[in-house]
Amino acid sequence: MTWLITGGTGYIGAHVARTMAAAGERVVVLDDVSSGVPRRLPPEIALVRGSVLDRELLDRTLADHGVTGVVHLAAKKQVGESVEKPLLYYRENVYGLTVLLEAVAAAGVRRFLFSSSAAVYGVPEAELISEDTPCAPINPYGETKLAGEWLVRAAGRAHGISTACLRYFNVAGAAEPGLADTGVFNIIPMFFDRITRGEAPRIFGDDYPTPDGTCIRDYIHVADLAEAHLSVARRWPPGTRPRT
Ligand SMILES: NC(=O)c1ccc[n+]([C@@H]2O[C@H](COP(=O)([O-])OP(=O)(O)OC[C@H]3O[C@@H](n4cnc5c(N)ncnc54)[C@H](O)[C@@H]3O)[C@@H](O)[C@H]2O)c1
């Protein structure tokens, strides 16, 4: 298998690319480096610089590298920005995915793994969320992820592509210092940013039913998440369609 990893110079994508390459998978990264850091990738992993909106570049990359599977992580991911710029989020996250799936279907790629988010659930009634918990996103970012899941599922059925969508919760940590999350938009980098500036971390919410009134959130270590991608990538025998 040769895997195209979109968004592979990003925080999570670089962990996924390195983990899959270290496990013996052939890997090529496509990234417009809008929020990525190319030096997160070792020299042996090829980087194609460009956008998932560029159909011609996608066609060339899939053909040149003999791509047989795609892990799609490229996206805009800031909730607040998505409220201010919903058109940008729908364009990058939904239209970009559409263009990528068109290229994938045309090239006969048979496996597609999509980075979704716990943001698809919105504010669920249930304390513990399962895959069957109803999805009701409360911001454009979450909406683009839910629409992305529908798109992936429909294209998979129509074009015989095995698909899987992984709904990540809060991703934290780093397999090594050079792979750390550099964007100050996730909670752990926000904490460290304030601490290194001599300020106390800000915790929102004080009326949750917890001992100190702050909310409880779920985290996954990015190295475990990267391993999960590898497991899913290897779980699909050719021609089968796992649940999405
Ligand atoms: N970090 C989290 O806690 C979290 C939680 C749930 C889901 N996710 C999802 O995981 C994925 C990766 O997130 P991340 O935290 O690594 O973010 P990130 O910003 O570090 O990585 C995103 C990567 O995609 C690239 N990119 C963006 N738009 C592109 C485009 N049009 N074409 C090509 N490349 C493009 C960026 O340059 C960057 O390298 C995203 O899809 C995000 O929605 C992240």
Image: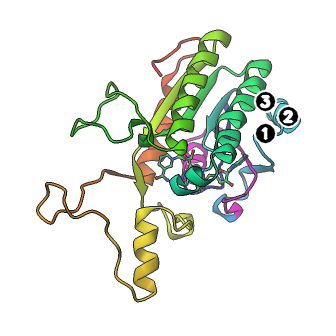
**Residue 67 visible in the snapshot:** no
Residue bearing the label numbered 2: 64
In which quarter of the view is residue 212 placed?
Answer: bottom left
**Residue 226 x/y as whole percent:** 49, 46
- Mark pair 1, 2: CA separation: 18 Å
Given this view, does label 1 or label 3 mark the residue nearer the observer? Answer: 1
- Residue nearest the observer in this picture, 112 or 17: 112
Task: Please identify the quadrant where the N terminus is shown.
Answer: top right
Left or right: residue 167 compared with residue 91: left
Q: Is mark 1 within 8 Å of ligand 1?
A: yes
Q: Which residues are magenta?
A: 15-38
* Dot 1 or dot 3, earlier in sequence: 1
Which amino acid does the dot numbered 2 rest on?
Answer: Asp
Pointers 3 and 2 in contact (C-beta within 8 Å):
yes
- Residue nearest the observer in this picture, 189 or 60: 189
Pointers 1 and 2 in contact (C-beta within 8 Å):
no
Q: Is residue 209 above or below residue 176?
A: above
Element at badge 1? loop
> On residue 53, which mark appears?
1
**Residue 101 x/y as whole percent:** 70, 26
**Residue 46 x/y as whole percent:** 76, 49
Which residue is at 30% across, 37% downward?
Answer: 124
Which amino acid does the dot numbered 3 rest on?
Answer: Gly
